[in-house]
Structures are given as C-alpha cells and as structure tokens.
Amino acid sequence: MALSIFIAQICDLYLLRTLFRIMKKIENIAKLFLITCVFVATAFSSSAQVKRVNACTKHIPPANEKFSQVYQFESVDIPPQFPGGERGLINFINKIKEYPYSAYERKVQGRVVCCFTINSDGSISDIRVIKGVDSCLNREAVRVIKAMPQWKAGKVNDEAVPVRYFLPIVFRL
C-alpha cells in the first residue's frame, strides 16, 4: 500500500520534474538505476490496482451462459465413476494403452500424471499433463484419456456437477 502511494506521488508532474533535475546532477549508471526502479515500481503499482479492481467485481455470466464451478474430487457428495468402477478403469487403460516405439527404443518409462474435468453430462474435457515423463508418453496418456467412454457424473446435493480428476498412467517396460 505504501509503495502505491509512493508511486502515485512520483507520478505527479511536479515530482517528476524534480526527479529529472536530480538526475541531471548524478552519473549515467545511477540514472539508469533510478529510471529502472521507477519503471518497475510503476509496473507493480498498476498491476496491483488491476488486481484490486478484479477482486471487487463479480463475474456475472450472460443470460445464455450458465456459470459452473469445477469441484475437486474430495469435495463432492458422490464422486464421478468410470463405467465398471476402478477395476474397469484399470482394465480400460491397460487394454487401450500402446507403448510408443520411440520410448521403447530409448527405454523410457515412468508415470504420467494427468488432470481432466468430468463434466456434468459425464463427458471429459480440459485434459492436461501435470507431470510428464517424455513427450511421446505424455501424448499417449492424453490419447488414452480422450478415448474413454462417458463417466457417471459426480453429484453435489443430488445435482450433477463438473469434477476435476487426477489420474496417473504408468508406462513400464
């Protein structure tokens, strides 16, 4: 807060003129340092003001757009479920997963941790690799997730909601 007040005072035209008068009297390196400090402080001050404005305003979705919150897996009443349960999920991954030949040649193995959203209709979206091993293994993990059938959606208060799900996919030789 004190920094933004200081910046506001520096931005006053009178104080800027005074600052330039002082700069005429000091050497070039000191001028560069002082200009850099003022520039950085101004940048931080303006970003802090933007954040303050954004924190005070609410996002109001348009009438045709329904605002939906993505819930964490632990915070829903009934978690989303793969058809066939956990055993079905493991069998599906092992059945459809193909070891990339380039990773096999280089003897690359490991665990790719992915994150995705199970929407309220059971479809999958927003697939991301959180912790990858190798680019070809990461692509294969994303492909496996994209190939999944619809899940049973998670529920909060008996209403289907989108839920974020983390899934490690292991690649072993």
Image (tube, grey):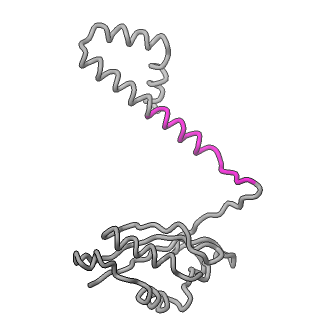
The answer to which image quadrant residue 22 occupies is top left
Nearest to the observer: residue 10 or residue 126: 126
Count how many numbered circles sit on residues in the image.
Answer: 0
Residue 69 lies in the magenta-colored region: no
Asked if residue 26 lies left or right of residue 53, the reply is left
Which residue lies at the image location 34% right of the left edge and 71% below the top edge?
A: 136
The answer to which image quadrant residue 50 occupies is top right
Asked if residue 140 lies left or right of residue 120, the reply is left
Nearest to the observer: residue 148 or residue 164: 148
Asked if residue 163 lies left or right of residue 138, the reply is right
Which residue lies at the image location 54% right of the left edge and 85% below the top edge?
A: 82
- In the rendered image, residue 97, in percent from the top left (x then y), is placed at 40, 83
Asked if residue 105 lies left or right of residue 7, the reply is left
Q: Give the magenta-colored segment's residue range.
A: 44-62
- In the rendered image, residue 7, in percent from the top left (x then y), is placed at 45, 25
- In the rendered image, residue 31, in percent from the top left (x then y), is placed at 29, 17
Secondary structure mainly formed by the magenta segment: helix
Which residue lies at the image location 46% right of the left edge and 75% below the top edge?
A: 143
Vertical placement of 63 versus 134: above or below?
A: above
Residue 52 lies in the magenta-colored region: yes
Q: Quadrant of the C terminus?
A: bottom left
Nearest to the observer: residue 40 or residue 104: 104
- In the rendered image, residue 156, in percent from the top left (x then y), is placed at 64, 75
Which residue lies at the image location 31% right of the left edge and 8% below the top edge?
A: 24
Nearest to the observer: residue 109 or residue 6: 109
